[in-house]
Image: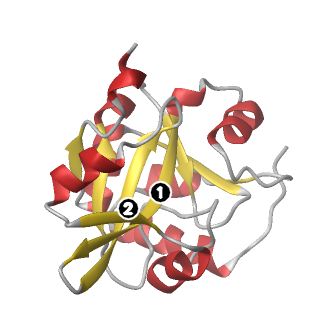
């Protein structure tokens, strides 16, 4: 299941973990043999519930003529509600980010965006639902990489805001 390879985006993320004092998380990074670009694929590969996967979703938060990246770490069990994100950020609009925008702002590819290790700190919302799992798994900078962490560590690492980001119909 685990292939030992080195990749620059994973190395940069590892450095961010170490700088934050998260040695245990850095030691837990796994490089899987197959890409896990979706929460379902990651959950299957790791043998964990899909809700324990922290999806890294990058959006464009539009404030007047300014556009900034917004990283939403949401549980794989549901989708982020764009209206809710707009309310939480005070943005005029929340737009889907394309692959180039994601890479430009994170230095990482879609499907492998880690919570940190980006060129600049990105405003981040961390889904409160992730707190219901003792261990959550997030991408580590590449579509084949994941690492175990906790909800408090995700919030601390990103400087993110804990928030309810899911659609109302996902509450069931």
Q: Residue furthest top?
A: 172
Q: Is residue 107 visible?
A: no
Does residue 72 sit above or below 48 in this rendering?
Answer: below
| Residue neighbourhood size for the residue with mark 1, other residues' Cα within 10 Å, grouped as few (<14), some (14–19), many (≥20) | many
Q: Quadrant of residue 3?
A: bottom right
Residue 100, numbered circle:
none
Residue 57, numbered circle:
1
In this view, the residue in front, 110 or 107, is 110
Gap in angstroms between the C-alphas marked 2 and 1:
6 Å
In this view, the residue in front, 49 or 117, is 49
Instruction: Label 2, secondary structure: give it.
Output: strand
Q: Earlier in the sequence, mark 2 or mark 1?
A: 1
Q: Residue at x 22, y 86 (%)?
A: 65
Q: Residue at x 63, y 26 (%)?
A: 48
In this view, the residue in front, 148 or 94, is 94
What quarter of the picture does the C terminus occupy? top left
- Asked whether the beta carbons under mark 2 and mark 1 sit within 8 Å of each other, the answer is yes
Q: Is residue 67 visible?
A: yes
Say left or right for 1 vs 117: right
Residue 71, numbered circle:
2
């Amino acid at each position: 299941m685990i292939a030992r390879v080195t990749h620059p985006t994973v190395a940069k993320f590892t450095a961010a973990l170490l700088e934050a004092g998260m040695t245990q998380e850095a030691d837990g990074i796994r490089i899987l043999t197959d890409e896990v670009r979706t929460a379902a694929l990651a959950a299957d590969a790791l043998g964990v519930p899909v809700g324990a996967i922290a999806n890294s979703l990058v959006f464009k938060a539009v404030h007047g003529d300014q556009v900034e990246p917004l990283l939403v770490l949401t549980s794989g069990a549901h989708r982020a509600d764009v209206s809710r994100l707009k309310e939480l950020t005070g943005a005029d609009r929340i737009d889907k980010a394309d692959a180039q925008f994601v890479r430009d702002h994170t230095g990482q590819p879609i499907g492998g965006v880690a919570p940190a290790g980006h060129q600049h700190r990105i405003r981040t919302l961390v889904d409160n639902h992730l707190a219901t799992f003792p261990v959550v798994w997030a991408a580590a900078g590449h579509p084949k990489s994941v690492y175990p962490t906790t909800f408090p560590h995700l919030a601390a690492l990103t400087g993110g805001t804990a928030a309810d980001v899911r659609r109302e119909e996902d509450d069931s």
